[in-house]
Amino acid sequence: MAAFAAAPIALALVLAGCSGTGNDSGTPGTTQGGGSSASPSVTVQGDFNMADSMFAMMMIPHHEQAIEMSDVILTKNDIDQRVLELAQQVKDAQGPEIELMQSWLDAWGVPSSGNMGGMDHGDGMMSQEDMGALDAADGPEAARLFLEQMIMHHEGAIEMAQAELEDGTNPDALALAQTIIDAQNAEIATMQDLLTRI
């Protein structure tokens, strides 16, 4: 927990030395030819603020844990096919988003958050006890636990994405935040429906 709490401080120190905030056209490492969106979406421009960096830095381990939860349920027997399909959908969406956000941090010269995926630090993250309970469960009980945990996990991600929309400035990060809100709200509705059916 202490390591996680220290992450924003460390990030602030990094950003103080390397942040580009938009209007200096000579930001190192960027190739701006006049338009701010001339590059492909994977190649972000140098203009970002602390909210953008924090969004990517914290969403990466959040997504990593969602994939871990999905991997757990996908290996179990006697799981409703609709739950398995949802778990695969989560993996298929969030894996590329992790790669995209990591590419932003690399481009911005901001360190990744490290391996904090198993820590119980709010924002919908599961504790080690939560993950252990999911791992130990079987069949319909495991399916229900996965859905309940993933709903909470998604709700945390949506809160993080909403904070990015309020405070961020980077167009690519803002677009991903909106994508996360839209996709995960839809998945929450699906999961809530599945909980009444399994």
Image (spheres, rainbow, N blue to C red):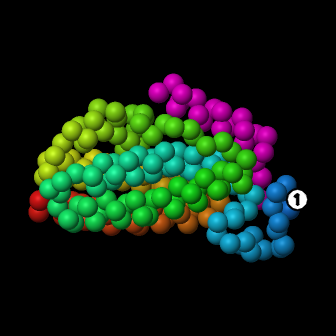
| Left-right relation of 92 to 167 | left
* Lateral position of residue 42 relative to residue 109, left or right: left
* Outermost top residue: 2
Instruction: Tell me if residue 52 can be seen.
Output: no
Q: Residue at x 14, y 51 (%)?
A: 139
Q: Considering the image in quadrants, where does the C terminus appear?
A: bottom left
167 above or below 121? below
Does the magenta segment cover residue 6?
yes
Look at the image and say whether residue 183 sits in the magenta stretch.
no
**How would you classify the magenta stretch by its main secondary structure?**
helix
Expressed as whole percent of the image width and height from the top left, the position of residue 105 reads 66, 50
Q: Quadrant of residue 36?
A: bottom right
The boundaries of the magenta stretch are 1-22
Residue type, numbered disc 1: Gly
**Mark 1 lies on residue:** 26
Residue in the image at 29% along x and 32% along y: 129
What residue appears at the point 38 percent right and 48 percent down from the top-left corner? Answer: 68
Q: Nearer the viewer, residue 79 or 43?
A: 79
Judge from the rendering whether residue 61 lies leftward or rightward of residue 68; answer left or right: right
Give x and y (percent) for residue 56: 57, 51
Give percent across and percent down for residue 153. Answer: 35, 49
